Image (tube, grey):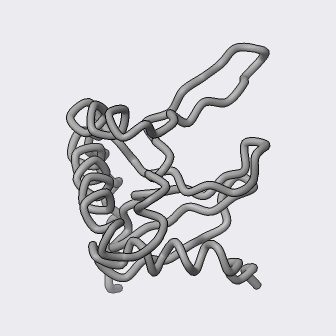
């Protein structure tokens, strides 16, 4: 049975609810937060406690940086690696209305990421012959 989300994960889902009902699922020692199958945020502890990280792209990155948000960076084989996620602005963590514009940016980035992925074709199973 899956582990239910912790209180902070549930709170973050509430904060992001402006873009639709959100679900938190365990992922890589943290949580992935998605709506309608799109991951728009992650909850991860990089050493300073659990933090909400919102999906970003080349269009929204300047807005996150202008707001003083930190880029998600981790060490892999001793080298810093970045991902297209930024910490949520502190003031946005206070209420769903304050988070709403940031949630919309994250959802737009998730939609763009899904559209840019190449579509793979599933093999077609042959129909059983009646005999």
- Of residues 17 and 93, the one drawn nearer to the viewer in this rendering: 93
Q: Residue at x 37, y 82 (%)?
A: 21
Instruction: Answer with left or right where residue 3 lies relative to residue 97.
Output: right
Does residue 71 sit above or below 97 in this rendering?
A: above
Q: From the image, which quarter does the N terminus lie in?
A: bottom right
How many numbered marks are there?
0
Q: Which residue is drawn at 65% across and 19% down?
A: 80
Q: At which x and y percent is residue 20? A: 30, 79
Q: Residue at x 71, y 78 (%)?
A: 6
- Of residues 37 and 95, the one drawn nearer to the viewer in this rendering: 95
Q: At which x and y percent is residue 31? A: 63, 62
Q: Which residue, as the protein is rendered here, is positioned at the far front? A: 91
Q: At which x and y percent is residue 14? A: 45, 81
Does residue 48 sit above or below 20 in this rendering?
A: above
Instruction: Answer with left or right where residue 68 lies relative to residue 52.
Output: left
Q: At which x and y percent is residue 101? A: 24, 61
Q: From the image, which quarter does the C terminus lie in?
A: bottom left
Q: Residue at x 65, y 58 (%)?
A: 27
- Of residues 58 and 102, the one drawn nearer to the viewer in this rendering: 102
């Amino acid at each position: 049975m899956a582990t239910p989300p912790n209180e902070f994960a549930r709170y973050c889902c509430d904060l992001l609810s402006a873009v639709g009902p959100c679900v938190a699922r365990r992922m890589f020692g943290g949580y992935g937060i998605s709506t309608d199958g799109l991951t728009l945020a992650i909850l991860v502890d990089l050493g300073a406690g659990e933090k909400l990280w919102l999906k970003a792209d080349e269009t929204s990155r300047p807005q996150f940086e202008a707001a003083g948000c930190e880029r998600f960076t981790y060490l892999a084989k001793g080298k810093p690696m970045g991902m297209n996620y930024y910490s949520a602005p502190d003031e946005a963590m206070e209420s769903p209305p304050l988070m709403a514009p940031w949630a919309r940016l994250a959802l737009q980035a998730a939609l763009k990421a899904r559209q840019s992925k190449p579509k793979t074709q599933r093999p077609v199973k042959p129909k059983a012959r009646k005999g």
